Amino acid sequence: SERTLVLVKPDGVERGLVGEVIGRIERKGLKLVALELRQVDEDLAKQHYAEHDGKPFFGSLLEFITSGQVLAAVVEGPRAISAFRQLAGGTDPVEKAAPGSIRGDFGLEVQYNLVHGSDSPESAEREIKLWFPSL
Ligand code: GTP
Ligand code: MG
């Protein structure tokens, strides 16, 4: 069994899609280990998205992720990292995420793509420590 960090980003929370995302995670058979609604500060945002520091969209990404409440969750199950990335769909909600995925069903713009999921076991470990240090 494996753990991954999932976020419902401010656009998803604002649009009332928290239940939709949690429902899909649960129906897939994945388990919720931790769940918390919170406002992200600049420091956490920078650490979370450190790999994108220096990219042209980094500033707007930080601004977006700190713009409202975020739902953070630790999700567990067999191949949970890949399983949630499949549920989420590709980064671009129109050209990469298939219909039937969260981004494919509800997203239109790359920045406003509703959810985050860790992309590797190393990222998952780092991100879970960052968001839920007590776990
Ligand atoms: P995350 O799960 O959020 O990490 O998404 P991802 O792994 O599918 O994509 P990636 O890590 O490459 O990018 C992180 C986030 O930055 C994306 O989810 C988008 O919100 C944003 N992003 C990525 N590429 C672009 C871009 O070209 N333009 C803009 N404006 N935002 C981008
Ligand atoms: Mg990523």
Image: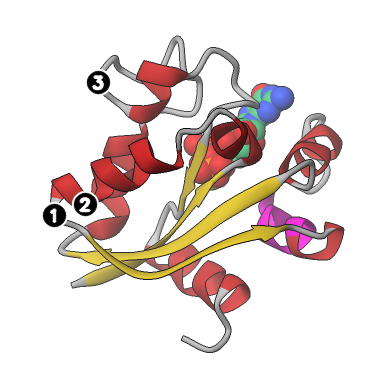
Q: Is residue 120 above or below residue 105?
A: below
- How is this picture coloured? secondary structure
Question: What residue did someone put label 2 on?
Answer: 26
Q: Is residue 91 above or below residue 37?
A: above
Question: What residue did someone put label 3 on?
Answer: 100
Question: Which of the four quarters of the rendered structure image does ligand 2 lie in?
Answer: top right
Q: Pointer 2 and pointer 1: residues touching (CB < 8 Å)?
A: yes
* Mark sitting on residue 29: 1
Sequence-wise, the earlier of marks 1 and 3 is: 1
Check disc 3: other Cα within 10 Å, few if <14, some if 14-19, many if 20+.
few
Q: Which residues are magenta?
A: 45-51
Among the 4 quarters of the image, the one containing residue 6? bottom left
Badge 1 marks a residue whose secondary structure is loop
Label 3 amino acid?
Answer: Gly
Badge 2 marks a residue whose secondary structure is helix
Badge 3 marks a residue whose secondary structure is loop
Label 1 amino acid?
Answer: Gly
- In 3D space, how far apart are the residues under numbered discs 1 and 3 (Cα atoms)? 17 Å
